[in-house]
Image (tube, rainbow, N blue to C red):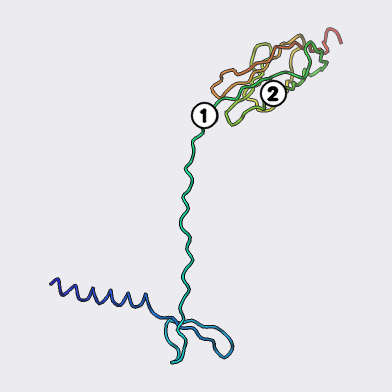
Amino acid sequence: MKSFLAKPALLLCLLISTSVHSEMYKWVDEDGNTHYSDVQPFKNANEHISPDINTTPAVKAPKQVAPKDKSASTQETKYQLLKIVSPEHNATIRNNQGNFSIALEIQPALNLKQGHYISVLLDNQITHDKLTSLSAAFSNIDRGTHQISASIKNKRGKILLSTDSISIHLHRKSILNP
């Protein structure tokens, strides 16, 4: 039984190997067009020998080098400056609607990729939380003296740096004193 299956398998291998190493023919027709074929078109057609395929040996990729200090890439930004630049300490603001805004300065820039944000406090109460801009607007604030401060926090809410508290004096018209 084994010899019965072996003969067709051997015959199949021979047929495949002859087709792999078949001859190629090249000729130019009367219009000047070049043709290639594995079947001889006429008796005097020239046998074409294909040029060897150009190969290039594989190049070893360089090994990836791990950063020398892994903690440097994940190290939290160290802020050197957080300051309220406007209004100035002890500034008097006259606004009958009780509106004003503050402007901050930060060095280096706020690191949003690490989830850092700014919290602004008015009279020790958070009024603006998770700010990513360097300004905050207040509206309808009662007249009087107010304390303003700000802090940079990380994504867990830990304070990284705080400003000194500044005082502002907000003046609004009064019904008693128009």
Going by the numbered disc 2, the residue's amino acid type is Ile
Q: Is residue 114 above or below residue 28?
A: above
Label 2 close to label 1 by CB (< 8 Å): no
Q: Which of 103 and 161 is in front in this view?
A: 161
Helix, strand or loop under label 1? loop
Q: Which residue lies at the image location 46% right of the left edge and 58% below the top edge?
A: 57
Q: Which residue lies at the image location 83% right of the left edge and 13% below the top edge?
A: 173
Q: Residues within 10 Å of mark 1 (few under 14, many from 20)?
A: few
Q: In this view, does 142 lie above or below 47?
A: above
Q: How far apart are marks 2 and 1 (CA)?
A: 27 Å
Looking at the rendered image, the disc whose residue lies closer to the viewer, 2 or 1, is 1
Residue 80 placement: quadrant: top right
Q: In this view, does 44 lie above or below 76?
A: below
Q: Is residue 147 above or below residue 41?
A: above
Q: How crowded is mark 2: few (under 14 residues within 10 Å), some or many (20 or more)?
A: some
Residue assigned mark 2: 106
Q: In this view, does 68 lie to the left or right of 84?
A: left
Q: Nearer the viewer, residue 106 or 17?
A: 17
Instruction: Give percent across and percent down for residue 2.
Output: 14, 71
Q: Which residue lies at the image location 53% right of the left edge and 28% below the top edge?
A: 74
Q: Which residue lies at the image location 50% right of the left edge and 30% below the top edge?
A: 70
Instruction: Give percent across and percent down for residue 31.
Output: 59, 89
Q: In this view, does 158 lie to the left or right of 53?
A: right
Instruction: Give percent across and percent down for residue 162.
Output: 65, 16
Helix, strand or loop under label 2? strand
Instruction: Give percent across and percent down for residue 78.
Output: 61, 22
Q: Which of marks 2 and 1 is nearer the N terminus?
A: 1
Number of disc labels: 2
Quarter the N terminus occupies = bottom left
Residue assigned mark 1: 69
Going by the numbered disc 1, the residue's amino acid type is Asp
